[in-house]
């Protein structure tokens, strides 16, 4: 299956073309500018892959949790391509994509777990625990780092760009014993493609997953303020 995967939910843009393996991919770390960067990156990755858009069979996109603007950019691009190409668009959460990267980098044993902690740019972080096969153990949550730190044991690997906030809540004697999976900080489009392809018969809808309500608010029209 030929998959185009897109992520712009957090502090990066990531795009990959996958067909049993990653054929081409790019990732650019950025705090803003996702809207402007995403479509040129998609075009570059398709060109590099040697494929035509018409050969794609599935679009996979990260659905959050993440930033309102970044999520909307990725979902709009994915849906637009899906409509233009008449192919399905499936969703993958940012937390499960990071967990999959961690498991691929350092496979845990039975009974081990992965705790993903992602930055929210607020006092709390997004967290979710996964078993050694990447199956979610509970729902994604926004928690204070201190609360998340209570989930850490010697059988739990910690990853994500919010991991340092969790570690900062631990005394040094405990911190040294935490299995901190370095280099696994944010979603990767290649992992998003694999997850979506593996569950193509039981897809997750490409709808935004918000834990916090969007910070953007619709302004009240001036006329409505007049008495």
Image (cartoon, grey):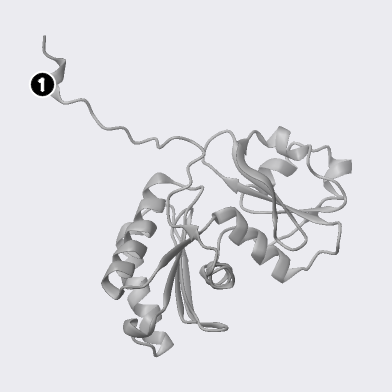
| Residue drawn at point x = 86 percent, y = 53 percent | 155
Is residue 179 or residue 103 the one in the foreground?
103
Quadrant containing the C terminus is top left
Residue 198 in the image: state x and y as whole percent. 59, 72
Residue 68 in the image: state x and y as whole percent. 40, 45
Q: Quadrant of residue 49?
A: bottom left
Furthest residue toward top: 227
Residue 194 in the image: state x and y as whole percent. 57, 72
Q: Quadrant of residue 183?
A: bottom right
Left or right: residue 112 versus residue 24 is right
Q: Quick check: can you spot residue 33?
A: no
Is residue 191 or residue 162 the one in the foreground?
191
| Residue drawn at point x = 65 percent, y = 33 percent | 144
Bin the neighbour count of mark 1 within 10 Å (Cα to Cα): few under 14, some 14-19, many 20 and up. Answer: few
Left or right: residue 69 versus residue 119 is left
| Residue drawn at point x = 21 percent, y = 25 percent | 220
The residue that mark 1 highlights is 223
208 relative to 82, above or below = above
SS for callout 1? helix
Residue 23 in the image: state x and y as whole percent. 50, 84
Is residue 60 or residue 171 the one in the foreground?
60
10 relative to 210, above or below = below
| Residue drawn at point x = 83 percent, y = 37 percent | 171
Furthest residue toward bottom: 50
């Amino acid at each position: 299956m030929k998959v185009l995967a897109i992520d712009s939910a957090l502090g990066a843009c990531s795009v990959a073309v996958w067909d049993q393996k990653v054929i081409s991919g790019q990732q650019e770390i950025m705090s803003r500018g996702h809207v402007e960067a995403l479509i040129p990156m998609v075009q570059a990755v398709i060109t590099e892959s040697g494929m035509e858009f018409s050969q794609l069979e599935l679009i996979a996109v990260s659905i959050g949790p993440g930033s309102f603007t970044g999520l909307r950019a990725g979902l709009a691009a994915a849906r637009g391509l899906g409509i233009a190409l008449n192919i399905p668009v499936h969703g993958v959460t940012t937390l499960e994509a990071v967990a999959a990267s961690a498991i691929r980098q350092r496979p845990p044993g039975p009974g081990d777990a992965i705790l993903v902690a992602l930055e929210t740019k607020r006092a709390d972080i997004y967290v979710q625990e996964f078993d050694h096969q990447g199956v979610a153990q509970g729902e994604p949550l926004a928690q204070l780092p201190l609360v998340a730190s209570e989930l850490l044991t010697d059988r739990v690997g910690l990853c994500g760009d919010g991991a340092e906030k969790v570690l900062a809540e631990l005394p040094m004697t405990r911190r040294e014993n935490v299995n901190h999976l370095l280099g696994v900080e944010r979603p990767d489009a290649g992992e998003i493609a694999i997850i979506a392809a593996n569950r193509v018969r039981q897809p997750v809808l490409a709808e935004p997953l918000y834990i916090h309500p969007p910070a953007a608010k619709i302004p009240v029209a001036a006329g409505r303020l007049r008495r």
